[in-house]
Image: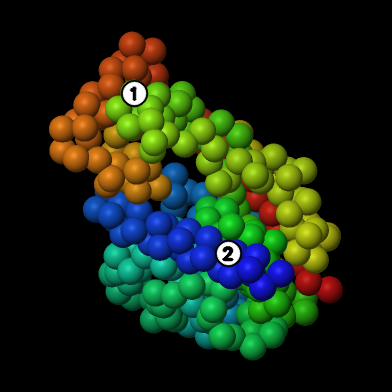
Amino acid sequence: MISQTVTNVMHSDEAKTKAAMAYNAAADHFDHPVSSFWHRFGRRTIERLDLQPGERVLDVCSGSGGSALPAAVRVGADGAVVAVDLAGRLIDLARAKAEDQRLNNIEFRVDDMLALGYPDHSFDAVVCVFGIFFVPDMSEAVRELWRMVKPGGRLAITTWGPNLFEPANGAFWESIAGECPDLHRAFNPWDRISEPDGLRQMLAEAGVHEVDILAESGAHPLNGPEDWWKIAMGSGYRGTLEQLDADTFERVRQGNLSRLLEQRVAEIETNVIYALATKD
């Protein structure tokens, strides 16, 4: 049992390190206009929460503020938002936006959502948009987030649905496999909860049973293959790309874009699942 616990901790630490590395690198493209979906789905998550003025919100895996900034607007000057992410460069982007919008009710933290140290029942709402799947034990992470929700408060988990970014995703990994088979990944972490039943089961394992789950189908337009490459450079794919030397990187890029051009890809799938639970 002790050996298994140590192994789990090592896997968790490795996952955090990889996620921080990938998204710190991706920060230079993360807010490019072609990747507007980050903020669109963040706003949609906050809309479903129906935040009230004066409420206190914890937003983890907050990226460059896609959900934290609209939450701060909703709760107003008498409310407060804590925005947390492992990637310091994304937090810097979010902080700059908050300053531009003169939002003084947000605290920014570069930290691990599993080790924040807040007491039980600290927040009226806890939010995690496109981040819960980076933790090897998602149920453990949800239990920790749920612990910090006040009675009567809400937990919002937003994750990707099936076929994320297809057909561009498949073309990307085909290009990687042709150059660096050892980096090819057939399984994405969000696949474990990309259907409502899987997400509901994971939440139940964390002790969250009464959940409103909404699955929405969507597509994101591309003006051309280069739009996709900017998305890849500003997302988790960057972690794989950072491991390539310059020549291999260019061959992967050309191979990926050629496939999209041949298939005349004009949009990618962006299916999303929203889960909202209220604590009795």
Q: Residue furthest top?
A: 262
Q: Position of residue 46 (x, y in %)?
A: 57, 60
Q: Position of residue 39 (x, y in %)?
A: 44, 52
Q: Amino acid at mark 2?
A: Thr
Residue drawn 33% across the image and 32% down it: 180
Quarter of the figure that contains the C terminus: bottom right
Residue 178: which numbered mark, if any? 1
Query: What residue does disc 2 label?
Result: 7
Q: Is residue 199 above or below residue 252?
A: below
Q: Is residue 258 above or below residue 279?
A: above
Q: Is residue 104 left or right of residue 116?
A: left
Disc 1 secondary structure class: helix
Q: Position of residue 38 (x, y in %)?
A: 44, 50
Q: Quadrant of residue 107?
A: bottom left
Residue 2: which numbered mark, if any? none
Residue drawn 65% across the image and 65% down it: 4
Q: CA distance from mark 1 to mark 2?
A: 32 Å
Report the coloring of the rendering: rainbow
Q: Residue furthest bottom?
A: 119
Q: Is residue 95 left or right of residue 191?
A: left
Disc 2 secondary structure class: helix
Q: Residue 169: tell me if it is visible.
A: yes
Q: Is residue 253 above or below residue 144?
A: above
Graded by Cα atoms within 10 Å as few (under 14), some (14 to 19) or many (20 or more), the crowding at tag 1 reads: few
Q: Residue 33: tell me if it is visible.
A: no
